[in-house]
Each structure stands twice: as structure tokens, then as C-alpha cells.
Amino acid sequence: MAARKTRSATKKSDATFTPEQDLQAYRDMLLIRRFEEKAGQMYGMGLIGGFCHLYIGQEAVVVGMQMALGDGDQMITSYRDHGHMLACGMDSKGVMAELTGRQGGYSKGKGGSMHMFSREKNFYGGHGIVAAQVPLGTGLAFSNKYKGNDRVSVTYFGEGAANQGQVYESFNMASIWKLPVIFVIENNGYAMGTAVRRSAAKSEEMYARGAAFGIPGEQVDGMDVRAVKAAGDKAVAHCRSGNGPYILEMRTYRYRGHSMSDPAKYRTKEEVQKMRQEHDAIEQVKHRMIENGAASEADLKEIDKEVRAIVTEAAEFAQSDREPDPAELWTDILVEA
Amino acid sequence: MAVEILMPALSPTMEEGTLAKWLVKEGDQITSGDIIAEIETDKATMEVETVDEGTVGKILVAEGAEGVLVNTPIAIVLAEGEDASAMDASKAAAPEPAAAPAEATSAPAAAAAAPAPVEVSVPADPDIPSGTELVSMTVREALRDAMAEEMRTDDAVFVMGEEVAEYQGAYKVTQGLLDEFGDRRVIDTPITEHGFTGIAVGAGFGGLKPVLEFMTFNFAMQAIDHIINSAAKTLYMSGGQMGCPIVFRGPNGAAARVGAQHSQDYSAWYSSVPGLKVVAPYTAADAKGLLKAAIRDPNPVIFLENEILYGRSFDVPKLDDWVVPIGKARIAQEGSDVTIVSFSIGMTYALSAAEKLAEEGISAEVIDLRTLRPMDMPTVVESVKKTNRLVTVEEGWPTSGIGAEIAAQVSAQAFDWLDAPVTRVSGKDVPMPYAANLEKLALPTVDDVVSAAKQVLYI
């Protein structure tokens, strides 16, 4: 099957949302935005260590996809993972406390920003090695097929990771074994500081990277949450009905640097400003809701207040919670049989 | 001139085989490319093509003959115009098959007073109930049976790897599994170690219990990121939420004449990684019992096999559920003068050396580690406290090797009991050479072990 191109990046999506869906998307995206802003601030205060990769700008991708998933579907991603965790319902206190390395963090403080998991929410990490999550997510799909359930594994990776060999090894096996995996390429334009046009052959068509393996692919406006959900619905239906893998290239943008120590010299401030002003995912929903009367400025302010309260509570917990007990150094190395 | 057809070697490690079937008879005309016979090794049945042309003059080895050594003449081909009389001439003229280079044997100097040989004592295995029937089987069969038994009792167990299904295993370890369990549970992968290892680890996260075969551990180096970063570390990084019950298995270390890239011993590499268990059995009984334990273990287990050992036979207890616990060494032979510690194929050197030492009146205790991580140091230390001398044996490299680790542990835990420095016998610190003589020099020998034992005994 040839890769199909839906150039929704260059035209308005015709997908529509109900007022309830718009409100949900708005709230979920805003939570990620505010959470990440707070995380950035706490990093600056020295409360978060190591690497910290913020998701600001890309919120529509994970929120739209989550709206397309059902119970038991799995998610796995790279180290830019805070947004994914919040989107799948993980508690913001547990995520923030992991960032500060506290015992109440999802990994008891032993994983950090890049390594968090939740069995309960079917979130399989949080992986620090670029593209390692791609065969792992394909393996989750393998387990679904082996068990004979109709669950789908959503495997996120950046356009930078899309140059790793193991991605194509995964495409090959996902295709020959017809595994229910959606490969979501989050194309934010920059692999660290290397623009996609400098690092990827046929960089305008990342969605077509599965064509040689017979995997259909689509390019999606990843700044429009409705377009993301519509594409997600289609991909999920494809996988659930036993047709094998599907690729979604989400054209998105990261406003912040690759990690906290990135001065972003590789792009202009104007480029970032233009994306923020003209394509911001949250602003789009906000304007739409106000325009069509789904919500008033006051309603949205109220949501903003709620979200800020959640983030403040998370930040406070993450600072007041205890560091892990020194004995934790020696636990969780092996499962005791 | 009449030409002898010799028993061919069909794999790098084949030394003998069964001449299963002749497809030609005396008097038949044959031409280059004709299939003339079928030969069975312990791994496979192979067809033999002739490169000679002429008439089959005489069949020298009858159909069904077992244990035919490589390079034994099996038939004589007469060239055009020759008759049977040429066969005698051929025999006279035929060069002797190249003899294996003579072992550098140092004739034991006749000591003035030859010491009395000591009795070799093999302790009964405490894990085997007395009276248990023992059956002889190869390591290869034992491994296969272990997988089959675990697959029968647990549907989450599946086998994946290159050529494990339709080809029946590159080394025939998975022979018959496809027939019994079908292609849902015995899965041929493309040649794509990095990818299929990640998929298997992901399947482990997803609740399955993969048994992943590497055609050899040399190829697993392409996949080592998933073995270590994904499989070994995730339990810790997830605060105990997400373990990976998986077995990575396959032949490890040197086979024979396959050169540097196909001969590496990874024992020390994997043994240094927290989050992994590492098993390296020697006998078929241990191979079976430990593989069953590894499959049941909720952690990632590296299961290091050895190609040379696949075809060796050992007694295996005939029990419904023979499981050997991971992490326990076995005293293969009791002794009092010196402790020799080894594992996997290193045990062949250790045991032969112990025999030689016994002839000279030296009583060696031989310990088979069986598991390298967690290593059963109490058993080693107990032995050292008795013998006060320790030699380690491995085929791997010496630097930062298993022997180095044991030496460090013993010097920390039993320094006051040592009467001599711990001495390591290992492969040489070089990439494995191809040339037969150099390869031999690169590997440890029985004499190296004997010398090391004498060295620590100051003899």
C-alpha cells in the first residue's frame, strides 16, 4: 500500500469537535503547558537536575492522539515524555516529584525526567536512548497480537529518531507480522539543533518512510488537535481491525530548546514567534470556542485557574516530599522470585 | 588416476558423522555436482556433492556407519579408462591426510620418587534425589527439552530468533519446536538483532516471557543496547513497576576456526551489569535445569551456551520437572590441595587438568560456577579455606575478566587463607586468530591449568 499524503499542515482541517471535546482538549493541553512552564522554572531554581526536555508547543499531538485511544491501549515514547504522562492520566504530583527526585515520584525518584512508567495507565516509558522505544513499542504490539486482544500500541518518536536503523528494523517486522502499532513521528523540525532538512532525506515526506515496507502513512497538522484526533481515529481503526501498522507524521513545533541548556542558536526568534502567534494549538482551540460560543473568556479563565492549582500543588508536593530512603539504592534491581 | 572421496567436514566444529545413505553404487558413472551420499551430523543431515568425475570404483564405508571421522576415505572414483587395479595404486600414492599438528607434549619428567596418584571423588549432586534414573543426552537436546517443557506449561513462553523455526535452529537447538508449538510461538525473525531484541524486550514488558535466541552472542553486540539499557535497567528506573522476564540465549565464545568476530566470550561483559542474571552451564543436566529456571525467572537472564559443548553427552536426571537454581555453583570434584574454578567449556580444561594432577598425587577441587551473576562466592571461598590455593579458568580475555573478579573477591573475603596469589588461566589478550596453530595458542590448554596449579603449590 502506498503512503498517502494528507497535507493538512497547509490547509485547515475539516475535522470538527463538539464543544465538550474542545473543552477537554483545551484543558488537557493547558495542563501540559502550565506543568512544563513550572518544570522549566523549577529547573532554573536548581530543583530539577540532569536533563529536562519540555513539551511546550507540541501539546496537541499527544492530547489529540489520547482522545482517539481506548482502554488498554499502550503508549511509549522518548525522553520528552512529561506531556505523554499527563495526557494518559498520570498524576501530575507523581510526575513532578520524579523530576525533583523524590520518593513520591513515579519511579520513586530513581528514574528522573526521562525514565518514568505507569503500568496502571499503560504508559511504558520514558526512554532515554533515541529510538529505543520504537522496537519496544513494536514489541508491545507483538504482545497484543500474541494474546489475541485488540489493543493498539502507540509508539512516539521524533523526526530525529526516525534516522535510527532500529526504526526500520521495527517497520519491517511490524509489517510482515501485521502488528497493531501506530508509529507517531513527532516532527518538530529540529533533532536537537539539526534542522530536519539537514538530517533527513526527503524531509518533507517523513510520513512516507514506511512506504518501502508497505506501511501507510499520513502527514498531519500536529498543531491542530482536531486533525490529530481525526488521524488518530483512522490509524486506530486500521490497527484494531488487523491491518498492521500505521504511520502518522505530526508536523509540530517545540517552542523551548531541546533541553534546558539549549540556547537555540540554530533558529531565529522570529521563527519561534511566528509559530506561537499563528499556529499555537491552545490558542486555536481558545479562539474557536470563544468564536462559536462554546465557552466564554470567564469560563476559560476558570479552567486556567484550576489547571494552575493542580500544577502548584504538584510543584509543592515535589519540593516537600522526602528524598528516597537511602535503602532504595539497593532495591528494584532484580525481581525477587 | 583413481581418487579417494573423503568424509567431509560439514561445519567448523564437526569431527565425525554418520554416513546415512549412499545415493550411488559401485559401477555408477558420476560427474561433478552429483549428489552421492547423505551424511548426518548431530545437527543435520547434509547431502554430499562430488567434485570428481568417473566411475564409483569402490565404496569403502558402508551405509549406516556411525562415527566416521572427517577425512576418512569413503569411496574411490576411477577415472575414464581405469579399472579396479588403479585402486591399489591410488592407495599407495594417496598422501596421508594431514595429521593434526602434534600437541606440544612435555613428557613428564620422571620424578625421583613418583607420587602416588590420588583418588578422584565426584560428589553426588544434592539436587538429585537418590535413585533417580539418569539418561544420557546432549547439551543440545537438554536445551530443547527445557524450552519445550516450559512452553507446555506456560502459554506466555515463546521462542524467537533467526532460523529457530523452519530451519530448526542454526545449531539445531530448537529442533522440533515448530512442529509441536506452531508458528505463533516459534518465530523466525529477519536478520535484525537490534530490532528483534527490542521487540522481544517490549513483548516482555507487555506480559510475555520471550526466549530470544541469538545465533551467536557475537551478533548480540548489535542488540546490546536493548539488553542493558532496556531490559536490565527498566525495573530500577521504574521504581520496581516494570520488569522484563526474558531469556537471551545462544552460543557464546570461541567455536572453531571462525576468527575474531565470531569467537568472543561475553561472560565478563554481561556479568558486570546489575539487573541481569548470567548463566553459563557446562553439563547437559545443568543446561536443562538452569534454562528452565531462567525461563521462570522474572528477570532478564543471559544464558551463555557453547557451540563445542552442544554435541557433548552427559547424564541428565529423568524427572518431570528438573530445575537447577540460578546462583549456585557445583563442586564437580572434591579435592584438598588446590581449588580450580571454572564454568562452561572452561570446565573441560579444569577437569582434565584435575585428572592429570591426580596422577601426580595432587588433589584438586574443581568448582563449576554455573551462574556468573550472582556468583556463588561462598562456595568458592569455602573451598579456598580448605585448599588455600586458587586457579581460575576461562576462555575469555584476562583483562577485567571473570578470573579477575574472582581474584578480587577472594582476596577480599579469604586473604588470610591464601598461601599463594590467585592465578588466572584464560584466553590470551588478543583477538581470536584464524590460523589453526595461532588459534590453539590463543586458547587456554589443560597444560596451562596444570602449570598454574603447580605454580600456586610452588612445585
Image: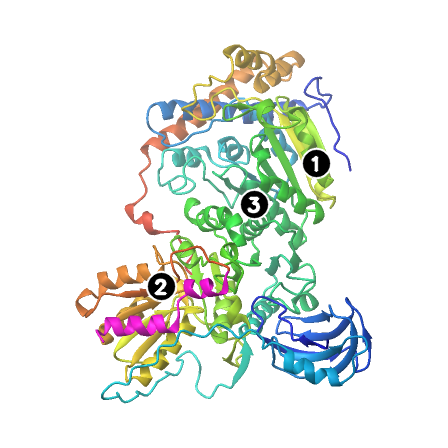
In this image, A323 relative to A72: left or right? Answer: left
Q: Is B403 rendered above or below residue A68?
A: below
Measured Cα–Cα span from mark 1 to mark 3: 19 Å
Residue sitting at the far left: B416
Which contiguous range is marked in magenta? B435-459
* Residue nearest the viewer, comparing A188 with B138: B138
Image quadrant for the C terminus of chain B? bottom left
Q: Which residue is mark 1?
A: A235
Q: Report the chain holding disc 2.
A: B
* Residue nearest the viewer, comparing A72 with B312: B312
- On whether disc 1 and disc 3 are found on a single subunit, the reply is yes
Q: Nearer the viewer, mark 3 or mark 2?
A: 2
Q: Amino acid at mark 3?
A: Leu
Do the residues under discs 3 and 2 have CB atoms within 8 angstroms?
Answer: no
**Where residue A136 is drawn, which disc sits there?**
3
Do the residues under discs 1 and 2 have CB atoms within 8 angstroms?
Answer: no
Q: Is B391 rendered above or below residue A26?
A: below
In this image, A128 relative to A325: left or right? Answer: right
Mark 1 falls on what kind of element? helix
Counting from the top left corner in percent of width and height, residue B386 is at 23, 76
**Where residue B375 is drawn, which disc sits there?**
2
One can see residue A38 in this view: yes
Residue located at (38% from left, 76% from top): B105
Q: Amino acid at mark 2?
A: Met
Q: Could you classify mark 2 by the number of other residues whose Cα lies within 10 Å: few (under 14), some (14-19), or many (20 or more)?
A: many
Measured Cα–Cα span from mark 3 to mark 2: 30 Å
